Image (tube, helix red, strand yellow):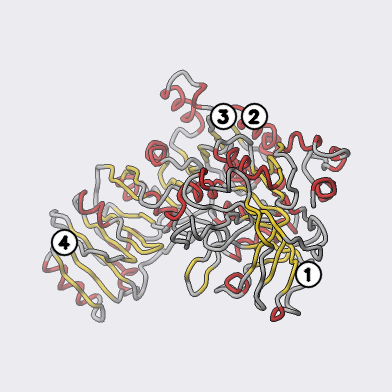
């Protein structure tokens, strides 16, 4: 539903713009800018932003400014950007060339990860986003690589709930990651050899998926001759050192020395497979940020058969009947992961959530404890600060997973914690590095665990249109209630205050802003009844917001 009639267009609007890196450059004197109503071209839409979710990704965006990889502006001071990618919108005006395709009053959710000819034009990063009362939707959105990035919304769904679809979609998408189970046919392949002499085998997978190009570094002469026989059509290059500025789809580190091996392991293309062949004893430094943002997948074998490195532990779902640990699982996004874990009958049997905030832990305990109990799950919430020593905390974790955790979902973007927590993985354990550690940030991981124990590390950034459509279908079928993640609401003038609350984890869940409700104060959902008379009567049996709740808020605060 929209805040007010879309044909009542204002002359001026409010918008929060980013003029550079840092919160001191977000807004004008800590206030939104007053701008003319945007003028649209014949092939564009003018939309009214009904609601927009606040995301920690926006905090990182504002802190980074022009350095953020999704920002196109080279000078934000002169060419500012309006953030906000978790947006719900209603069509307010239709360009003449779009007449018949779109109508005033239609409501949509936007898939913010927009691609045009393979190039990312993210809404709220490269394109002006939803931290504005009105926004322009151009052809990049309406006619991108996947068609239109707008999905229609059912009128029965409150905008403040629909604004939670995008973060929920990112959570769901992180469990559908698909990694290759064989080398990339026609790709680029790198082999780096150490000083140890070994007789290697190619195996059926390599023979069946020939690359177009092969680079051999420090390869024995006999191996170079064998490559020519196995891949007769491939272009083969022999070298004494790693090539500069080259990326590879499949990388084989054949008993490689650590220094060269670490460098080679960071030479992957997007979704590259990096294979450790042989026995390794040391921890190496890994670009864990690129596991999340580039989809790098590290695997291996202690033997000498290259094909044996593939197809072990390539799952992305939580192990059925297993034990999962969610560090930071009481945070805004962590609660979504935790809700999925306790709700899934085919998911883990033991769920451990750790967080440094007792208030957030208590909130999750109250909200999800009954669900876990009803589904027969072991559900424990722990604060490491409440233990006498790190050793005591370790002992408590070991009680629930004596052989290690089958899954660890990292919801804290700290490389040092990735290193520390990876030690708790069981054989064939999987760590989902969900929290967005910047690409280039490194952490030490055990190569022996990757090659010998089958431990894997995965991550994902954002989602695609089909993922968002899947979330919409789940909500429509009653299989998901995103409203449980809503923790606070507010109006346009308190948007920056809301982002500060996100940055400092003030609320135990997601915050949603109504841009066209200028003066609505930032308010926790637990106190939402204070915003307007009668709101308490609109909440559902579980105390969650409804369409009637939103109607009362709009009646009082919208302009």
| Circles 1 and 3: CB atoms closer than 8 Å | no
Q: Secondary structure at mark 4?
A: loop
Q: Which mark is residue 241?
A: 4
User: Which residue lies at the image location 39% right of the left edge and 36% below the top edge?
Assistant: 420
Q: CA distance from mark 4 to mark 2?
A: 55 Å
Which of the marked residues, 4 or 1, is nearer the chain's N terminus?
Answer: 1
Residue 409 location in percent, x, y? 50, 44
Q: Secondary structure at mark 1?
A: loop
Which of the marked residues, 2 or 1, is nearer the chain's N terminus?
Answer: 1
| Circles 4 and 1: CB atoms closer than 8 Å | no
Which tag is nearer the camera, tag 1 or tag 3? 1
Residue that badge 3 annotates: 357
Residue 17 location in percent, x, y? 57, 53
Quarter of the image for residue 542 reads top right
Q: CA distance from mark 2 to mark 3?
A: 9 Å
Q: The N terminus lies in which quarter of the figure?
A: bottom right
Residue that badge 1 annotates: 104
From where the camera sits, is residue 432 visible? no
Which of the marked residues, 3 or 4, is nearer the chain's N terminus?
Answer: 4
Residue that badge 2 annotates: 362
Which tag is nearer the camera, tag 2 or tag 1? 1
Q: Secondary structure at mark 2?
A: helix
Which of the marked residues, 1 or 3, is nearer the chain's N terminus?
Answer: 1
Residue 42 location in percent, x, y? 67, 78
In the drawing, does residue 505 fall left or right of residue 71?
A: right
Which tag is nearer the camera, tag 4 or tag 1? 1
Which of the marked residues, 2 or 3, is nearer the chain's N terminus?
Answer: 3
Q: Residues within 10 Å of mark 2 (few under 14, many from 20)?
A: some
- Return the residue nearer the eye: 358 or 349: 358
Q: Is residue 139 above or below residue 196?
A: below
């Amino acid at each position: 539903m929209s805040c007010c009639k879309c044909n009542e267009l204002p002359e001026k609007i409010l918008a929060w713009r980013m003029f550079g890196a840092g919160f001191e450059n977000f807004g004008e004197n800590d206030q939104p800018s007053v701008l003319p109503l945007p003028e649209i071209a014949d092939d564009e839409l003018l939309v009214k932003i009904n609601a927009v979710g606040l995301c920690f990704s926006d905090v990182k965006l504002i802190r980074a400014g022009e350095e953020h990889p999704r920002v196109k502006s080279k000078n934000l001071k002169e060419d500012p950007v309006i953030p906000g990618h978790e947006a719900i919108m209603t069509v307010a005006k239709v360009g003449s060339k779009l007449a018949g395709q779109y109508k005033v009053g239609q409501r949509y959710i936007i898939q913010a990860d927009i691609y045009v000819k393979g190039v990312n034009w993210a809404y709220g990063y490269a394109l002006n986003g939803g931290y504005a009362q009105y926004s322009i939707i151009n052809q990049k959105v309406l006619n991108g690589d996947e068609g239109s990035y707008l999905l229609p919304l059912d009128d029965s769904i409150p905008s403040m709930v629909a604004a939670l679809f995008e973060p929920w979609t990112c959570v769901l998408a992180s469990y559908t990651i698909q990694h290759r189970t064989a080398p990339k046919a026609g790709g680029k392949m790198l082999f780096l050899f150490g000083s140890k002499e070994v007789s290697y085998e190619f195996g059926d997978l390599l023979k069946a998926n020939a690359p177009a190009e092969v680079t051999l570094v420090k390869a024995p002469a006999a191996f170079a001759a064998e490559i020519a026989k196995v891949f007769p059509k491939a272009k083969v290059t022999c070298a004494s050192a790693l090539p500069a500025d080259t990326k590879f789809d499949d990388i084989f580190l054949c008993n490689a020395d650590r220094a060269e091996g670490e460098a080679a392991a960071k030479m992957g293309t997007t979704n590259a497979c990096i294979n450790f062949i042989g026995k390794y004893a040391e921890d190496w430094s890994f670009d864990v940020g690129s596991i999340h943002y580039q989809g790098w997948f590290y695997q291996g074998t202690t033997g000498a058969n290259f094909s044996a490195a593939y197809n072990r532990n390539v799952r992305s779902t939580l192990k059925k009947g297993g034990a999962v640990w969610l560090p930071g699982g009481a945070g805004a996004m962590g609660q979504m992961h935790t809700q999925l874990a306790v709700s899934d009958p085919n998911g883990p049997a033991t769920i451990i959530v750790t967080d440094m905030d007792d208030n957030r832990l208590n909130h999750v305990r109250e909200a999800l404890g009954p669900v876990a109990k009803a589904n027969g799950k072991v559900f424990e919430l722990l604060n490491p600060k409440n233990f006498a020593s790190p050793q005591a905390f370790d002992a408590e974790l070991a009680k629930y997973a004596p052989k290690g955790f089958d899954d660890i979902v990292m919801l804290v973007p700290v490389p040092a914690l990735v290193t520390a927590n990876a030690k708790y993985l069981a054989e064939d354990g999987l760590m989902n590095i969900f929290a967005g550690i910047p690409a280039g940030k490194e952490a030490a991981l055990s190569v022996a665990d990757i090659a010998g124990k089958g431990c894997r590390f995965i991550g994902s950034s954002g989602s695609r249109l089909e993922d968002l459509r899947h979330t919409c279908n789940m909500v429509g079928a009653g299989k998901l209630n995103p409203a449980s993640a809503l923790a606070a609401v507010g109006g346009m003038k308190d948007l920056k205050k809301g982002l500060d609350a996100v940055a400092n984890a003030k609320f135990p869940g997601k915050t949603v802003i109504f841009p066209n409700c200028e003066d609505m104060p930032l308010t926790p959902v637990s106190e939402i009844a204070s915003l307007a008379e009668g709101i308490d009567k609109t909440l559902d049996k579980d105390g969650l917001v409804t369409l009637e709740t939103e109607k009362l808020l709009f009646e009082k605060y919208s302009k």
